[in-house]
Image (tube, grey):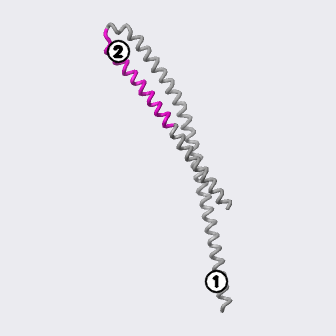
């Protein structure tokens, strides 16, 4: 019975670890999507700046430098945010790895305990069959 309780507890721990893995994976995906969005925004700003530079008229060139400086500041802000996300992503990847390792350890222990429970059940069944066999043999011996 104690083995069965251990088995149930390990199965619950395994389920919790799987849920934790799923949640970390979802969070990691969201951060990566945000980082990809920031990269697209930076690229859009670069494209816009290049287009404005190429299409600017002599009258607009007076303002072009200020516009390009503004674009550079925006791109720098997006890059800072992206770098912060990179640090968060790295930390989450480490957490994901640790959780995965813990999950695999739990699965290994769970498999071992299941094998022990199965072996105990098989031993009990063999002992019961042995008792039945002895009882039948005893009855046959007593009848004759």
Residue 102 percent location from the top left of the image: 59, 46
How many numbered badges does the structure rendering display? 2
Residue 85 percent location from the top left of the image: 52, 30
Q: Is residue 63 left or right of residue 6?
A: left
Q: Residue at x 62, y 67 (%)?
A: 121
Q: Quadrant of the N terminus?
A: bottom right
Question: Which residue is tagged 1?
Answer: 136
Q: Residue at x 68, y 89 (%)?
A: 142
Q: Residue at x 43, y 17 (%)?
A: 71
Q: Secondary structure at mark 2?
A: helix
Q: Residues within 10 Å of mark 2 (few under 14, many from 20)?
A: some
Extreme-bottom residue of the structure:
144
Q: Which residues are magenta?
A: 28-57
Q: Residue at x 31, y 15 (%)?
A: 55
Q: Which quadrant of the figure has residue 5?
A: bottom right
Report, in whole angstroms, how far the alpha carbon at label 2 lies from the one at label 1.
101 Å
Q: Nearer the viewer, residue 48 or 94?
A: 48
Q: Secondary structure at mark 1?
A: helix
Q: Which quadrant of the figure has residue 126?
A: bottom right
**Mark toward the start of the polypeptide (2 vs 1):** 2
Q: Quadrant of the C terminus?
A: bottom right
Residue 45 percent location from the top left of the image: 40, 21
Checking the image for residue 48, the label placed there is none
Checking the image for residue 53, the label placed there is 2
Residue 88 magenta-drawn? no
Magenta span: predominant SS is helix
């Amino acid at each position: 019975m104690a083995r069965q309780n251990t088995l149930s507890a390990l199965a619950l721990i395994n389920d919790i670890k799987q849920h934790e893995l799923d949640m970390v994976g979802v969070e990691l995906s969201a951060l990566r999507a945000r980082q990809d969005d920031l990269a697209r925004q930076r690229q859009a700003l670069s494209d816009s700046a290049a287009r404005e530079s190429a299409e600017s008229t002599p009258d607009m060139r007076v303002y072009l430098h200020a516009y390009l400086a503004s674009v550079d500041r925006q791109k720098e802000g997006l890059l800072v945010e992206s770098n912060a996300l990179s640090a968060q992503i790295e930390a989450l990847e480490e957490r994901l790895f640790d959780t995965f390792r813990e999950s695999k350890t739990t699965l290994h222990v769970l498999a071992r305990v299941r094998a022990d429970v199965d072996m105990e059940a098989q031993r009990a069944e063999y002992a019961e069959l042995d008792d039945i066999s002895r009882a039948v043999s005893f009855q046959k011996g007593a009848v004759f």
